[in-house]
Image (cartoon, helix red, strand yellow):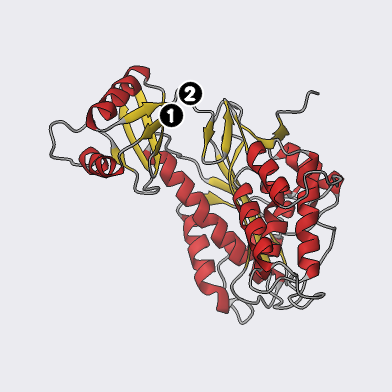
Amino acid sequence: MQKVNNIENFENLMEFLMEKNSKKNFGLRRSSYDHSMFFASSSSGCILLVVYVDDIVITGSDGTGIKKLKDFLASRCQTKDLGPLKYFLGIEVSRICLSERKYCLDILRDSGMIETKPCESPMVPNMKLKADDGDPFENPEKYIRVVAKLNYLTITRPNIAFPVSVVSQFMSSPQTSHWDAVTHILKYLKGAPGHGILYENHGHHVIEGFTDVDYNGDPTTRRSTTGYYVFVGGNLVSWKSKKQNVVSRSSVESKYMAMAQTTCELIWVRNLLGEIGFAQSKPMNLYCDNEAAIHIENNLVFHERTKHIEVDCDFTHEKLEDGIISTPHVRTGSQLADVFTKALPGLWISAICNKLGMYNIYDPA
């Protein structure tokens, strides 16, 4: 990891790195799909450079090229080599595991919950919160601060993505019941603050996605919640839990909107990997547990019940016809995306976390 001390010189350096006509160009190209990433490929391997303000992470398979890049950076601006990556933007890196243990403990201290008794799930199963539940919370600034920090914690804790997305909806006017839901999340985190994502070598780079929907789950707006996650090489790399923008008139409609959104994410991941040398030739599997939605996608026949979602249908069907995605069915009982759409019991949450590759590296067992 590199630290740049002179921002002005660093900005000039980035422009210099992207200057195609410069003979002194190191050879890095800026990614078209993630502008914070630069890359270079050669017969010796690949080099990836990720930048955030004045912090730089360099990785890749070309050890000699990485050393030359470090020397190049040092010659153009004032830098400090911090050695192997261990901590970046609150994320603790332990070789093949990412976690936010220190950040999680800081949240517990800031909220006065460091001594709280742990619980088994991040949200009471089947809980439905409304905007006017209970009395106004006495400290809305604290609510906003803690929820904002929890939102950042979801970077390495996908198991709290759904409850955090729920409590985030009440930032403008939090009630006591909403704060109770926040404290429930904190109690769950107290049980395993070192929980993180483990990345293993499964011998392939297959991209696949799973999508699910909680149909009309919001008791106030009746909007559905989309949940999805993406695996690359059997490892979790992307996920989301988000309320849909419009009310769905059927579960099939809500599922189809979720499939379209997940397809967009799959294509983005595919393009990003292809750009740095990991092109995918086979269709990406998009797993869904709604057979009616899969049937519509594979048999594009519109009628009065589906014509209002024609754009989503056209988009996903086009990607299916082009061989970019395929849509196998997954049984509801095997649908791990449930964790992104609804509040589940503790045992179910624990089982899903294991299948998603989440472990507590600080657990002595």
Label 1, residues with CA under 10 Å away: few <14, some 14-19, many ≥20: some
Residue positioned 44% across, 26% down in the render:
82
Nearest the viewer among 115 and 101 is 115
* Quarter that holds the C terminus: top right
Q: Horizontal placement of 173 versus 126: left or right?
A: left
Residue positioned 28% across, 29% down in the render:
73
Q: Amino acid at mark 2?
A: Pro
**Residue underneath mark 1:** 1
Q: In this view of the protein, can residue 298 be seen by the observer?
A: no
**Residue underneath mark 2:** 84
Q: Secondary structure at mark 2?
A: loop
Whichever of labels 1 and 2 marks the residue nearer the N terminus, that label is 1
State the image quarter where residue 204 is shown.
top right
Q: Position of residue 235 (x, y in %)?
A: 61, 36
Check contact, mark 1 vs mark 2: CB within 8 A: yes
Q: Position of residue 100 (x, y in %)?
A: 63, 39
Residue positioned 39% across, 49% down in the render:
33
Residue extending farthest to the bottom is 304
